[in-house]
Image (cartoon, rainbow, N blue to C red):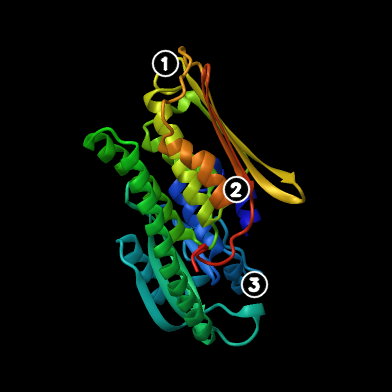
Amino acid sequence: MARRIQDFDWAATAIGARAAWPQSLKTAADVMLGCGFPAVLWAGREAVALYNDAYADLLGPRDDLGRSGLGALEPARAIVAPAVDNAWRGATVTLEDNVLPLRRDDGGENGGFILSCSPVRDEAGAVMGALLILVEAHDRGRAAQARNLIVAELQHRVRNILAVIRSIVSRTAETSDSVDYLSAHLDGRLAALARTQVLLTRGAASGVDLEGLVRDELLAQVADDDRIAVEGPEVLLPPKAAEVMTLAVHELATNATKYGALATGGGRLTIDWRIAMRDGADWLEFRWRESGVRIAVAAPRRTGFGAVLIEQRVPYELMGTGSLAFAPGGVRCEISFPFTPRRSVLQTDAD
């Protein structure tokens, strides 16, 4: 279904071409595709349907992709429609033991399902869709096991994120000359980390989209899109890599906005990445290049948080390499690390 969604002619639907989708819709689609249970996302006021492989299995030969309305669930409108309506009003609704006109392999009687319907919000917090997740009655045990796994791993993840926050606070304090500097930089770094945690919480099963991460950080800096080029293949970062890359991009964007390519009218910023083979493994190679900075950027007199993050934390936490150079014309940064799939629902390095 991920491939079908990518290739579908969305320009012919009410939600428009996929390239123009807001990041909130892309993230919602990633969450839906990564869900282990049947899930359908109704996007936009026309309720255009997107769904995952598990839901496609329930549909059998039917095809609701890109269509508006309940589709195959229309015979169960009395059950489903009120839940969807409540989701559009911002509420999450869970319904137990409902018979729906869906069955595996078109065999047997209509199945009994637990329904959970939740609102999907856009960047401004407004509801822009509804996400329905179905759990077949005989899957209760599997659902409970999945819930217990998530709770256990979430406890590890909380400990891990607290360690990251302590590190950010400590390093920011070390490099701050005043309370105002400490407050401003600490707020920005924690806000960047929080943005990634929101994405991980919504879509831990599928990862964080690298392009969306980069654009979100640039948007947070009120960057001028006309002077920025972002290019690279679709990449879903596992949680640990997403945390490190968010903080790295935040530091680079902050510096570019205050002192670098985005601080002057003639500067430009080029960001690109690729997946390359190294020693039999896939590596992500990320490059940040500034140009058009009139005065050669002098290297700072002391090592700042960003430099430590890129040159030390990337090798330590991601087993990769990171370099940061203050060159004539603007900053140059390269980050590379092995691109490995996530190990679990909420990947964590904590024991």
Pick the front one: 293 or 87: 293
Q: Is residue 220 above or below residue 243?
A: above
Q: Can the viewer see residue 51? A: no
Tell me the distance, in whole angstroms, between the alpha carbons under discs 3 and 1. Answer: 56 Å
N-terminal label among 1 and 2: 2
- Residue in the image at 51% along x and 86% along y: 141
CB within 8 Å, label 3 to label 2: no
Residue behind mark 1: 265
Locate residue 144 relative to residue 178 in the image: left or right: right
Q: Is residue 181 above or below residue 162?
A: above
Pick the front one: 206 or 336: 336
Tell me the distance, in whole angstroms, between the alpha carbons under discs 3 and 2. Answer: 30 Å
- Residue in the image at 41% along x and 70% along y: 155
Mark 2 surroundings: few (<14), some (14-19) or many (≥20) residues within 10 A? some
Q: Amino acid at mark 2?
A: Val
Mark 3 surroundings: few (<14), some (14-19) or many (≥20) residues within 10 A? some
Tell me the distance, in whole angstroms, between the alpha carbons under discs 1 and 2. Answer: 31 Å
Residue 159 placement (x, y as % from top left)? 40, 64
Residue behind mark 2: 235
Q: Which type of secondary structure does the marked residue at label 2 adopt?
A: loop
- Residue in the image at 43% along x and 49% along y: 24
Pick the front one: 349 or 121: 349
Q: Which type of secondary structure does the marked residue at label 1 adopt?
A: loop
Pick the front one: 102 or 152: 152
Q: Which type of secondary structure does the marked residue at label 3 adopt?
A: loop
Residue 2 placement (x, y as % from top left)? 62, 56
Residue behind mark 3: 60
N-terminal label among 3 and 2: 3
Q: Amino acid at mark 3?
A: Gly
